[in-house]
Amino acid sequence: MKLITQNEKVSRAELKSLAGRMFGGMVKAVVDIKKGIMFIDAEMHADEEAALLESGSKQEDLWGINFHPAETEEKFVEFDSMINIRPRQGNRSRGIDDEATRIKILAVVKKLML
């Protein structure tokens, strides 16, 4: 697992390398939309989520995504994770139902990419 912050960004080439050895084209990530950080490269989103919670993140700010570095921009980020199922926050699916939340996630991703 690797923490990505403004001080240590990640490149698409690095994501491609990680994807090749883990899930054959995909890298899991959990984004903290409030702190503007994310963990990448774990077998399960829940592991990345736990690491962020241990470092002081709040559950309601954490969202699971998948990177597909070999895909086009439209398919580069996939909003799909079991940790996203949160009825108390109005999210009843593995996706991210709220467009404003998706926009916040994409803004964090953009800031953390080289």
Image: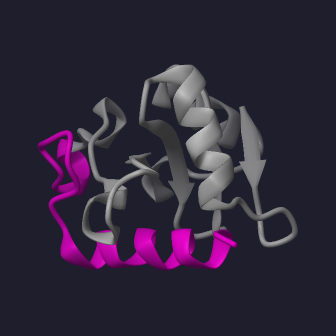
Where is residue 95? Give x, y as percent. 20, 48
Using the rendered view, name the quadrant where residue 53 is placed.
top right
Residue 3, placed above or below residue 21: below
Looking at the figure, which quarter contains the N terminus?
A: top right
Where is residue 3? Give x, y as percent. 76, 47
Looking at the figure, which quarter contains the C terminus?
A: bottom right
Residue 107, magenta (yes or no): yes
> Left or right: where does residue 24 sit relative to residue 49?
left
Residue 53, placed above or below residue 57: above
Residue 66, magenta (yes or no): no
Q: Residue at x 13, y 42 (%)?
A: 93
Residue 78, placed above or below residue 9: above
Where is residue 44? Give x, y as percent. 49, 22
> Left or right: where does residue 49 sit relative to residue 88?
right
Where is residue 31? Give x, y as percent. 53, 55
Q: Is residue 43 or residue 26 the one in the foreground?
A: 26
> Left or right: where does residue 31 sit relative to residue 41?
left
Q: Main secondary structure of the magenta part?
A: helix
Question: Which range of residues does the magenta coloring cover?
Answer: 87-114
> Left or right: where does residue 106 sit relative to residue 113?
left
Q: Residue at x 69, y 34 (%)?
A: 51
Question: What color scheme is it?
Answer: one colour
Residue at the extreme right: 7
